[in-house]
Image (cartoon, rainbow, N blue to C red):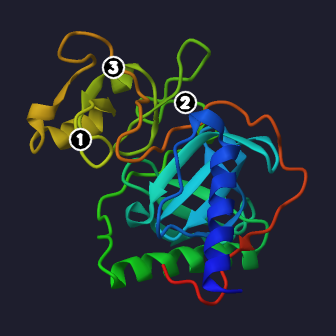
Amino acid sequence: MSQLNFAEENRERIRAVEASFGSAGKPLYQDGRILIGEGKLMKQSRRGLQPKVFFLFNDMLVYGSIILNGRWYTKQQIIPLEAIQLKDKKDSIDSTNQWLIRTPRKSFFVEASCEEEKQAWIDHMIDCQSKLLQRGQCTLRSNFAVTWVPDEASPTCMRCDYKFTLTHRRHHCRNCGLLVCATCSKKRGVIEHIHPTKPLRLCEECHGKLANGNAKNLRQRGDSDGRSSSDEDGAEWYSVEEETGEDEEQMSSWVSYSYLTPQHFKP
């Protein structure tokens, strides 16, 4: 395949990914950006593993919820590769072929259909990061969000042991990731690598630990004008939001990772 033909095919593939997210998705094509591979992974959310479609580019990772397989996706999330750290997870009785994707704002586990597919994702992501670093096009981040404890992991608050109910709901401390009740997480504070200005939910213990070094950014629930602060906010320089609903299409069968780039790939 000639360089010219590859460039044209790459452009068409990226435009197709853009179109699959509809008008709600952000533009993805730009000069020098290459679609490396794509596939479906199970992503850990607060309601358990959910099927997501993932697209690996030479400078970023994009994923979204599946509405119509191969044609229509929603809830587009974009993470620059410089903001990602990967960590392997050993297989256990409860989980296989999983690894952790850490980002400054949110960290989560993903699961592949087999060891070979898992390794393909990890190898290509690391390779793309390495090439960006070699060319001086990025600086890797050093601060990452903790992984949230799944909702089903505890029937009670992990600080006071009060039982969760329909009215006594689960929440997550943004600093430690534990499941906590509203009473144990009334405080708010800024965690800069998650959001530079927004006060986030904190449990009493984490609020106390952060108070000395970050006192000016810690306060009771509510913004400076007295309005309540939402736990989930909009996108900043990249978007990683928590999925709260079920995908409309569950994966009836795995679709393997597809490596799209030929040997002359030059990120």
Q: Could you say where residue 70 lies in the image, as x and y percent from the top left?
A: 80, 51
Circle on res. 196 = 1
Task: Estimate how packed mark 2 is, as few (under 14), some (14 to 19) or many (20 or more) residues with alpha carbons within 10 Å.
Answer: many
Q: Quickly name the residue at label 3.
A: 229
Residue 106 vertical position relative to residue 54 in the rendered view, above or below: above
Q: Position of residue 156 (x, y in %)?
A: 55, 30
The residue lying at 65 percent from left, 37 percent from top is 22
Describe residue 261's horizontal placement relative to residue 34 as left or right.
right
Q: Which label is found at residue 92?
A: none
Label 2: which residue? 156
Which of the marked residues, 2 or 3, is nearer the chain's N terminus?
Answer: 2
Indicate the amino acid at tag 1: Pro
| Label 3 environment density (alpha carbons within 10 Å; few <14, some 14–19, many ≥20) | some
Few, some or many residues within 10 Å of mark 1 (<14, 14–19, 20+)? few
Name the amino acid type tagged 3: Ser
Give the image location of residue 170, x and y in percent. 52, 27
